[in-house]
Amino acid sequence: MIRMRYRGTAEFVLSKPLPREAINEIPKLIDEFNKNILRRGAKKEEEAAKIKSWTTKDNTLAFEIVSGTKVRVHVATLRIRKALVKFLGQHRIGIRKTRLVDAEIILDGDYNITAQIPFVKEVVKEGGKTIVKLEVLEETELEKPYIDRMIKLFELKELRAKWGGKAEHWILIKSSPPREYTFKEDPNIILEKSGLMKRYAVGQYVYTPPLAWMFNKLQELFINEVLKPLGFIEVILPKVSPLEVALRSGHLKGAAHNMVFVCTPVSSDPSELESWYDWVYITENPDGKMLQRYLDPVSYYMEYAQCPPFYAFLSKEVIDPKKPLKWYDKSGPSFRFEPVGGVRGLERLFEFHRIEIIWLGEPEQVIQIRNELLEKYEYFMQKVLDLEYRFAWVTPWFLVHAGEIREEKLDLNQPGTIDFEAYLPYKGPREDPHSWLEIGNISIHGTKFTKPFLIKHKNPKKIVWTGCSGFGTERWLLAFLAQHGFDPDNWPEKVRNAFKGIPEPLEIVTYPKPEGKKILEDLKKTLFAKLRA
């Protein structure tokens, strides 16, 4: 917790100057403020606010305030205003304007805070302290929790710095025994050169029928082996959501740089866009900057995490979790705007497919479901796919900041995430972290989502938790092919049987390219010959 204090001047513009008899009463009024009104809610004197001095000139009355952490300077200003209304009314004087000027937040220590933060005018570091000087705050801004949120933002930034810029802490839980591999080629290259998939745009591919078949059969295998035995039921969730959903889920506060946003046209009347249509017709130029003139501001986003519509659906509902909700969604892709250097084959995509598993219940139920899923995941990796894998406990900093995690240590019964990683032989030795690919995860959120979405328990003394897990289809298949190759004779029996009946590959005059035809011929002799027999 950052130690901090506050100071500032509360200014009240009055309907007329104070008369002499009112001025004479101010010291007594201030004494009442300091002893009672500005101490309410503070256990210690240093936690309260206090008026240090006051001035009056023309029709302006000003109070210099210092405050602690419980009664912050903006709260003190509003309390003073409320008390002043009654006092001034006795003299037939009203308050026309309230504002806080020259406000400062004094933090003990050197913190990485900049003036780019809203309402911050300047940041000064002196005497081992960081002094954040605020812009003038009007009454409407004082009534909103802007300063309180600013303090939380300071703490969040400090937490990020403490974690060394990492999004999470990583602790190995378990790993399967290492094994030897005869196949060490990159499946991405084989899939693309053979024409089983074709690059559509950065981070997007067209998957031809054989690869689409493999994706779908892998999903079916996972659903039948993991989800259905545990009682999960399929739903269909939207893939384009209003910004309000991302605000409540928290993604707008930390993931906006990876999100894809959606605009709608200024009108559904074609005549409103006629000049745009004329431009495109004549120039054949899809000028995106020009198109912005015909679009409303951003109002939607394409699903980044896939589960927020679940929380939005249950928003403001009261839950009686005698039977916890256990759903999964596989109805469409998720979208993440990745840096160009970070997009590569099936490892990291702009548009990707996954099964999103979501559940809700009391804390004990949510933990139990996570444990059952974890057991099934391990079975799926070992007995079905025969993968070399490892599990890692990751403590996301945002859960620490939200107060869901109290201590930074391994405790599987508290909110947090377990990542599933698979070894990719073509990437290099196991000692290199880049040789491991996160293919899925499983999380307990605590109340991170139920609180902002106002999802409540029937019993007001109890709380509702949520959990989710992602099965990234492209990554799971990539990991499988990286370890087992493209010869079904080297595959586990359940996968070989599930993939049987694969469609024939596409071959036309110009596709695949000449350098890929030899690769495709080899696949036809192994992969296709044995799965179509």
Image (cartoon, rainbow, N blue to C red):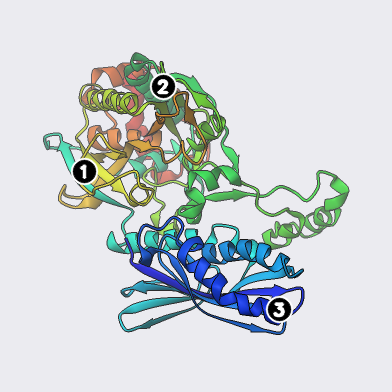
- Which residue is at the front of the view, 150 or 531? 150
Residue 262 position within the rendered picture, expressed as x and y whole percent measured from the top left: 63, 48
Q: Which residue is mark 3?
A: 18
- Residue 39: numbered disc: none
Q: Which class describes the residues within 10 Å of circle 1: few (<14), some (14-19), or many (20+)?
A: many
Q: Which residue is mark 2?
A: 502
As measured in the structure, the alpha-carbon distance from the residue carrying label 1 to the one carrying label 2 is: 26 Å
Which mark is nearer the camera, 3 or 2?
Answer: 3
Which of the 4 image quadrants contains residue 500? top left
State left or right for residue 231 relative to residue 87. Answer: left
Q: Report the amino acid beneath label 2.
A: Ile
Which of the 4 image quadrants contains residue 364? top left
Quadrant for the C terminus in the image: top left
- Identify the secondary structure beneath mark 1: helix
Q: Which class describes the residues within 10 Å of circle 2: few (<14), some (14-19), or many (20+)?
A: many
Q: Which residue is mark 1?
A: 425
Q: Report the amino acid beneath label 3.
A: Leu
